[in-house]
Image (tube, rainbow, N blue to C red):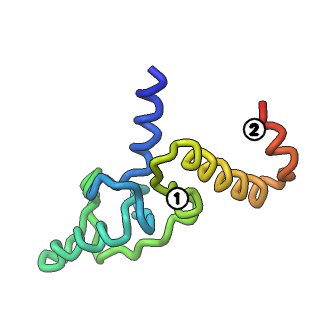
Amino acid sequence: MAQRGNQLDQEKFCCSICLELLKDPVTTTCGHTYCMKCIKSHWDTEDEKRVYSCPQCREDFIPRPVVRKNTMLADLEVKQSDDPVSSVLSVILSLSGFITKHLNIKTSTLLLFLAF
């Protein structure tokens, strides 16, 4: 059961086009997130029709939408590693930076909380 939970969590950080961890994540106006390179390539194939669609929900966009970097996911970018401990630590450090910056929680308080 815990393994299934971890699998779902990893899927949240994967691009549904290339099926890899998000690289340079951007979010469309419908709210779906892709690698910048992947969504641009997808929309390049639709240039002739001049109607652009979301690969997931198929929402149409006219004109071609401008996508913006998803800074929250970019900050949480998980480094691939053979060592699961360093991967977990990388995520914790990324989250701690985000939490302390945006939620005004002191780092020492956060680390104490994570210790339990």
- Provide the residue designation for mark 2: 114
- For label 2, the SS is helix
Residue kind at label 1, given as amino acid type: Glu
CA gap, disc 2 to disc 1?
Answer: 20 Å
Marking on residue 21:
none
* Residue at image location 65% in from the left, 48% down from the top: 92
Residue kind at label 2, given as amino acid type: Leu
Q: Considering depth in this image, is 111 or 81 the residue closer to the camera?
A: 81
Question: Is 83 located above or below residue 28 in the figure?
Answer: above
Marking on residue 77:
1
Residue 112 is left or right of residue 90, and the answer is right
Q: Residue furthest front?
A: 83
Residue 5 is left or right of residue 100, and the answer is left
- For label 1, the SS is loop
Quadrant in the rendering for residue 32: bottom left
Give coordinates of residue 63: x percent, y percent: 29, 77
* Residue at image location 33% in from the left, 55% down from the top: 20
Q: Quadrant of the N terminus?
A: top left
Question: Is 42 located above or below residue 83 in the figure?
Answer: below
Q: Considering depth in this image, is 65 or 115 the residue closer to the camera?
A: 115
Give coordinates of residue 84: x percent, y percent: 52, 42
Question: Is 13 located above or below residue 61 in the figure?
Answer: above
Dot 2 alpha-carbon crowd within 10 angstroms: few under 14, some 14 to 19, many 20 or more: few
Give coordinates of residue 39: x percent, y percent: 30, 67
**Sooner in the amino-acid sequence: mark 2 or mark 1:** 1
* Residue at image location 29% in from the left, 51% down from the top: 57
Quadrant in the rendering for residue 85: top right
